[in-house]
Amino acid sequence: MTTTAETPVNTKTAPRRAVHYHCFNCLKADLDRLQRAHDAATLTTTGNWTPAQNLWHCAKFMECSLDGFPSAAPAPVRWIAALLFKRNAVKTDKPVPAGFKLPKEAAYLLPPEDITFDDAMSYLRNTIARVDAGERFTHPSPLLGHLTHDEWTTLHLKHCMLHLSFLHTGEA
C-alpha cells in the first residue's frame, strides 16, 4: 500500500481510513495509534506522501496559523475563495477534498523528502501542545483571510483528517 513519488496515485480515489476528530484530544489519540503502528512496522500510506511527510505538513500549516504565513494569495483570489469556500471549510462537517495541488506560492507547506517519522510526529505534537497551553490561532489564512480561533481549529482538524486518513495502521 505504500506509494512513492515514482508511482503517484490519484488521491481522489485512493483508499482511505475513516477518521473523525472533533477536538485535539481525538487527534492526539489517533497520533498515539499511528505511533504504535509505526513502532510495530505496520504503518502504511495509500497517498503520495510518507507518513512522516503527512504529519509534518499538518504541523507546518498549524504552526503558520500560530506564527504567520510567509505569503498570501492576491486579494481578489482571497475574496472569491472566502465567498465560495470559507463556509464549507470552517462551518460544516464537509470534509476537505483530496487531490488539491498546492500552488507554487505555498511551497513552504511541502514536506521535506527526508523528514523522519519521529521528527515529524514531535513537530505535530509540539505544535498541538502550544495550542493546549493557550496559544491562539490568530493569523489570517493566506486563502480564506481572517478566521476566528474556533474556525481555525475546525479547519486544522479537518485538514488533519484528510491527510491522516491516507495512513493505515494495520488494525482491523
Image (spheres, rainbow, N blue to C red):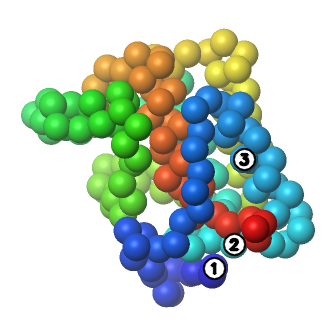
Q: Real-space Cα distance between discs 1 and 3?
A: 19 Å
Q: Position of residue 72 (x, y in %)?
A: 29, 35
Determine whether, in the image, residue 56 is placed left or right of residue 133.
left
Tell which circle, 3 or 2, labels the residue nearer the N-terminal end.
Answer: 3
Q: Amino acid at mark 3?
A: Asp
Farthest-out residue, top: 134
Along the line of sight, which residue is nearer the eye, 53 or 97?
Answer: 97
Tell which circle, 2 or 1, labels the residue nearer the N-terminal end.
Answer: 1
**Circle on res. 46:** none
Pointer 1: residues within 10 angstroms few (<14), some, or many (20+)?
A: some
Q: Real-space Cα distance between discs 2 and 1?
A: 5 Å
Residue that label 3 marks: 30
Camera sees residue 72: no
**Quadrant in the picture for the C terminus:** bottom right
Residue drawn 40% across the image and 16% down it: 148
**Quadrant in the picture for the N terminus:** bottom right
Along the line of sight, which residue is nearer the eye, 134 or 10?
Answer: 10
**Circle on res. 2:** 1
Q: Amino acid at mark 1?
A: Thr
**Circle on res. 44:** 2
SS label for mark 2: strand
Tell which circle, 1 or 3, labels the residue nearer the N-terminal end.
Answer: 1
The answer to whether the residues at label 2 and label 1 have Cβ atoms under 8 Å apart is: yes
Q: Real-space Cα distance between discs 3 and 2?
A: 15 Å
Vertical side of 67 occupied by 56: above or below: below
Q: Amino acid at mark 2?
A: Thr
SS label for mark 1: loop
Camera sees residue 151: yes
Pointer 2: residues within 10 angstroms few (<14), some, or many (20+)?
A: some
